[in-house]
Image (cartoon, rainbow, N blue to C red):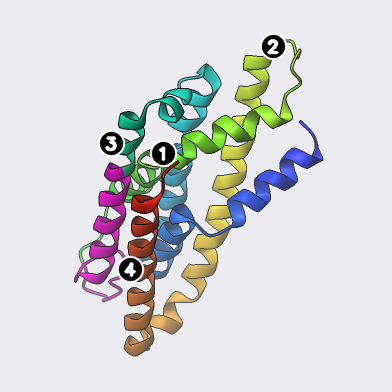
Amino acid sequence: MGLDYLLTSMVVIVLPGTGVLYTLAIGLGKGFRPSIAAAFGCTLGILPAALASIVGLAALLHTSALAFQVLKYLGVAYLFYMAWTILRDGGALDVREDRTPQSAFRIALNGMLLNVLNPKLSLFFLAFLPQFMSADAAGATQSLILLAAVFMALTFIVFVGYGACAALARDYVITRPRIMAWIKRAFAGTFGLLGVRLALADR
């Protein structure tokens, strides 16, 4: 593992995706500590795809149209569900002081499901990790595990940073309901667009 892998991983992680959006939404709506749970859940959601790539099971998604389509539409449905929960009262971006708190477990579970129900993640790891392995490398499995673990650690660190930035802006947003309303629509619309994009994706 070298600098190329670290830089490539950082670029992939920093680019906004469902995990980043979810962590930002939780940090903005509920504060810094809940955003840590969101970051942890999103990081755990990487684990199945990483393990599948390591043992070669991710190839199933590439060769089986049915397996890919089933997982894809589960992911689409969950993205639309997240868009709805953001817009509804008491959802992820509900910042009223009398709101019912959401447990860290529930926040982490939602973040994990967002990544688990993403067939692109498995295909990404299938294409991404082998680029940094030599064809005749001894202990290839151990090396792949290390690469995946580093990627997950970087993901958690970056997502916690995103959550912290969102939490810092939270007090400013709470006192401006109009800004909060537009932010909720923007997040919900983005999740909806991601769902549409995933639904239209072939592979």
Q: Is residue 22 left or right of residue 177?
A: right
Q: Determine which of the numbered discs, if any, sits on residue 139 in the image.
A: 2
Q: Which residues are magenta?
A: 73-99
Q: Is residue 121 visible?
A: yes
Give the residue at mark 4. 188
Question: Splitting the image into 4 quarters, where does residue 26 fall?
Answer: bottom left
Q: Amino acid at mark 2?
A: Gly
Residue 96 falls inside the magenta stretch: yes
Give the camera-side residue of 122 and 115.
122
Q: Nearer the viewer, mark 1 or mark 4?
A: 1
Q: Is residue 149 visible?
A: no
Q: Determine which of the numbered discs, if any, sits on residue 19 in the image.
A: none
Kind of element beneath mark 2: loop
Counting residues from the start of the chain, the first of labels 2 and 1 encountered is: 1
Decide: is 172 above or below 145. below
Residue 168: x percent and y percent?
A: 51, 73
